Image (cartoon, rainbow, N blue to C red):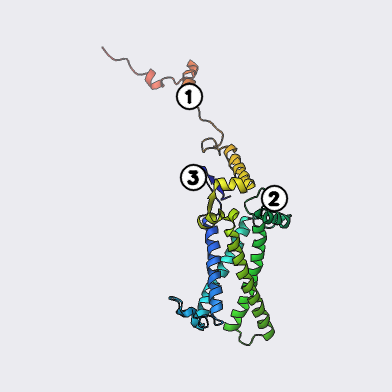
């Protein structure tokens, strides 16, 4: 678990660098897709957007189309990475749970002073519901966009019915994406949610805020830390040997001294027969 408490800095790590990167890749490429898609209508020249410094390309259909294709590559890659990365890790924090709709209604009521918020885990119930909605919208945009791109590049004679359906799905997904983006921005503006803006930008939130609004999440982190602290240390290399303990040098010397006299090495015969030195 990448979540951890940094008590000396009074903050909690909420998102890893990878999670921040994939979030902003989807967000920024999505905004580029919205802008370049609208410029193809053409809105750039109709509403004089191309007169804004740096947006002269907004009135050029082919340039807008190329920007749209480039942004779509980043968008699709980030979405696929998110699905594979978190799927392999087994992350389930954003999956909706039973009772999320009812709890979300209670949260909305609390914003207007009616009742109190229940204790939350890492993610709010409305965040989990919005996540599923965004997954559906992104899937609509990607699938329909791939069909339209295939038609433009490889199959200009594609079935009119298929192209029509892909166009309608893409346009509906476009409208839903805009509405979801506006709802996302509106949720951040709400006072209880403002501390989460720091998490989106830096990956960390205040520990005081997390204890107040996400006590279940903090309890989970502290439980994991306590379990890790109580786990026995791994055996050292010396302790994990074959189990044979070598006798200390003193003990070996003591065994030699304890040998019976007759078992000690006696002089060789050649030494016994040697003549006595002459005086």
Badge 3: how crowded within 10 Å, few (<14), some, or many (20+)?
few
- Determine the CA span between mark 2 and mark 3: 32 Å
Circle 3 residue: 9
Q: Is residue 43 above or below residue 206?
A: below
Residue 20 location, x and y as percent? 53, 59
Does label 1 or label 3 sit earlier along the sequence?
3
Q: Name the residue located 48 percent from the left edge and 26 percent from the top edge.
A: 248
In the picture provided, is 31 more to the left or to the right than 87? left
Tell me the quarter of the picture where residue 171 sits: bottom right
Residue 237 location, x and y as percent? 51, 38
- Determine the CA span between mark 1 and mark 3: 57 Å
Q: Does residue 248 appear in this view?
A: yes
Mark identifier at residue 252: 1
Residue 68 location, x and y as percent? 53, 76
Between 261 and 42, the residue placed more toward the observer is 42
Q: Is residue 61 above or below residue 35?
A: below
In the picture provided, is 41 more to the left or to the right than 132? left
């Amino acid at each position: 678990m990448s979540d951890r408490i940094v008590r000396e800095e009074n903050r909690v790590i909420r998102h890893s660098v990878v999670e921040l990167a994939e979030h902003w890749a989807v967000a920024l490429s999505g905004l580029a897709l919205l802008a370049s898609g609208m410029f193809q209508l053409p809105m750039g020249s109709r509403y004089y957007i191309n007169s804004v410094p740096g947006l002269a390309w907004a009135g050029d259909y082919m340039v807008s189309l190329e920007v749209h294709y480039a942004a779509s590559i980043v968008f699709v890659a980030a979405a696929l990475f998110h699905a594979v990365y978190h799927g392999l890790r087994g992350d389930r924090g954003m999956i909706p749970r039973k009772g999320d709709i009812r709890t979300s209604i209670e949260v909305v009521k609390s914003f207007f002073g009616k009742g109190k918020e229940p204790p939350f885990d890492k993610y709010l119930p409305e965040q989990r519901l919005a996540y599923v909605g965004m997954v559906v919208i992104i899937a609509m945009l990607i699938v329909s966009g791939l069909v339209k791109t295939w038609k433009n590049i490889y199959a200009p004679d594609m079935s009119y019915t298929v192209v029509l359906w892909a166009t309608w799905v893409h346009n509906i997904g476009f409208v839903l994406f805009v509405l979801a983006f506006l709802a996302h921005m509106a949720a951040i503006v709400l006072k209880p949610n403002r501390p989460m803006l720091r998490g989106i930008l830096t990956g960390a939130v205040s520990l005081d805020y997390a204890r107040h609004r996400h006590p279940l999440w903090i309890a989970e982190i502290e439980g994991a830390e306590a379990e890790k602290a109580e786990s026995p240390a791994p055996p050292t290399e010396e302790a994990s040997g074959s189990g044979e303990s070598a006798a200390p040098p003193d003990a070996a010397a003591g065994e030699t001294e304890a040998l019976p006299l007759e078992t000690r090495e006696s002089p060789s015969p050649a030494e016994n027969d040697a003549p006595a030195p002459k005086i």
